[in-house]
Image: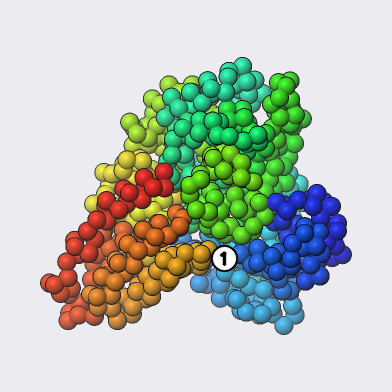
Amino acid sequence: MGLDADAVLTRHGRDRTRLLDMLWDIQRAWGHLPEDVVAGIAEGLGTTANDIRETASFYHFFHTTPGGRYRIYLADTVVARMRGYDEVRARLEQETGATFGGPPDPTGSFSLLDTPCVGLSDQEPAMLVDSVVFTRLRPGKVADIIAQLRAGATPEEVANPAGLPHDDVAYVDHLVETNVRTKGPVFFRYPTDYRSLIRDCLVLTPEQINERISESGLRGRGGAGFSTGLKWQLCRSARGERKHVICNADEGEPGTFKDRVLLTRSPKQVFAGMVIAAYAIGASNGIVYLRAEYSYLIDYLQRQLDEMRADGLLGPAMMGRKGFDFDIRLQVGGGSYVCGEESALIESCEGHRGTPRLKPPFPAQRGFLGEPTCIDNVESFATIARILEEGPEWFRAMGTADSAGTRLLSVAGDCSRPGIYEVEWGTTLSAVLELVGAQDPMAVQVAGPSGECVSVAADGARQIAFEDLACNGAFTVYGAQRDLLGIVREHLKFFVDESCGICVPCRVGNTELLRGVDRVMAGHAAHADLDEMVRWSQIIRGASRCGLGATSPKPFLSTLQRFPDIYRSRFRTPHGVMLASYDLDEALAGYDAAMRELEEDVS
């Protein structure tokens, strides 16, 4: 309490691009964003209070009205629902006296809110109490946590009774598990001498660095799979006095948590990759955009950056090289799935709503502050450091013709060994299922809700590769006992909730798909409803402005293609039999071609 607008403005240099940092400072001090403080921030930035409120309203974790002393965010995900979510949710309401989405409890102590995936699918159910995380929840554990909070303990004291320092990896490990199941050739191998690595890179010319990355065949690990070397070359050749490097650590795709683990186990490998990228393109400014759900990593990551500065690996005239001035700052998001899209992320970094931009121009041409910007994924930057350490030929020797190297998989669901696995591109679906201890698997959600739901029986021989099953890292196993249609519904609901709303096809179309699935599940759908859902899917994919709308129909389309019986069995027809007049192949005509076009467009 007591933090005023002038103090916040001064702390952040009255810089409009630091608005999200200012909002976090205010909310941590007051529990919400008071009107008078917001008005003071607006005046100091030369804008209006309405503008500040409009920006804040875009993000899940900013609140303009007071809530309970503690805000509890329970992750509502498919995997959580497979692991006792309903019982945990009911016990939270029972113990706190509050209801989800409703007012605080009568004592003003607790507010209960649902939130999407918080990057902990290998240890759910999970919740955040303010920014403190609790995993592997059970009703009894919930009762104990709430009892301690009622008795006067803070969330921090409940979660960290030993008082471990926040900037130490032991603190992070105490809160969450990393569950690294395999240590492959690229990740989690052994300590690296980053000073020697960066020194050796600075001996080369920027053009030579770009050539090595191109020769390696590295493609972006964020999902689109665009050539990293080509992206860097475009950014280096783009006109602009200043250039920027941004690490996208906003892994909001449900089921994905590999970037969290990389930032815990190998943060300097990621930062070294950013330094190499900065040298290659001529950048002076670096930003790590960290999703708000990973706030417990902030102090630890800041310490890693401070150590690199102390070692001369960040800052002015890096390692004595005059003219190479590069530093990295952390930017914490406010809770928005769409900010994982690169142009929306840039808008957020500039202190705006995370609304995706129209393309072109692309970020490599006009990105942060309208200047050339290289945006890559956490895994991509970590991979870059290893490529420069071992050489492009070493990396290119792994994988397939079109997918060089390895891929980190975030594995969750019906398997005995959830966690992080490094596999070579080209590994088959069946091989991964055997590796993770899949339990009577029926389907796999590859690359999260925006990816493909594939059949274990029909697709077991398919390869994890850009040319086959292009996986962004999420790999969720569903056993034969699961209701796939219910899972489709949860995924569509996620997209409805996370759409930024600027596109009518995405805003309206996804709602119509969700309504259609509800009709099917209720036994009220006819053949015409399914036809209409396919048509809506085509409209959404073809007319949406960013990747969310381009991929949001996939939960419906991919299950319709692979598991038509989950729809057929619930149709409003005699004996549940689909009429002969309904032609599933015709309804899905062009689906494979459309998916190929989508992948090309996203790339």
* Residue at (23, 52) in percent of width and height: 458
Above or below — where is 227 with respect to 6?
A: above
* Residue most extreme to the left: 580
In the image, residue 181 lies at what x, y percent?
48, 41
Observer-nearest of 384 and 16: 16
Q: Secondary structure at mark 1?
A: strand
In the image, residue 285 lies at what x, y percent?
67, 37
Above or below — where is 452 with respect to 490?
A: above
Instruction: Classify the position of the C terminus by image quarter.
Output: top left
* Residue at (51, 45) in percent of width and height: 361
Residue 240 showing in the rendered view? yes
Above or below — where is 135 with respect to 525?
A: above
In the image, residue 502 lies at what x, y percent?
51, 64
Return the residue at label 1: 115
Observer-nearest of 602 and 150: 602
User: Which of the 4 image quarters holds residue 30?
Assistant: bottom right
Instruction: Classify the position of the N terminus by image quarter.
Output: bottom right
Q: How many marks?
A: 1
* Residue at (59, 49) in percent of width and height: 346
User: Which of the 4 image quarters holds residue 259?
Assistant: top right
Q: Residues within 10 Å of mark 1 (few under 14, many from 20)?
A: some
In the image, residue 177 lies at what x, y percent?
58, 49
* Residue at (29, 66) in percent of width and height: 534
Coloring applied to the structure: rainbow
Q: Is residue 560 left or right of residue 140?
A: left
* Badge 1 amino acid: Thr
Observer-nearest of 55 and 268: 55
* Residue most extreme to the top: 203
Residue 260 showing in the rendered view? no
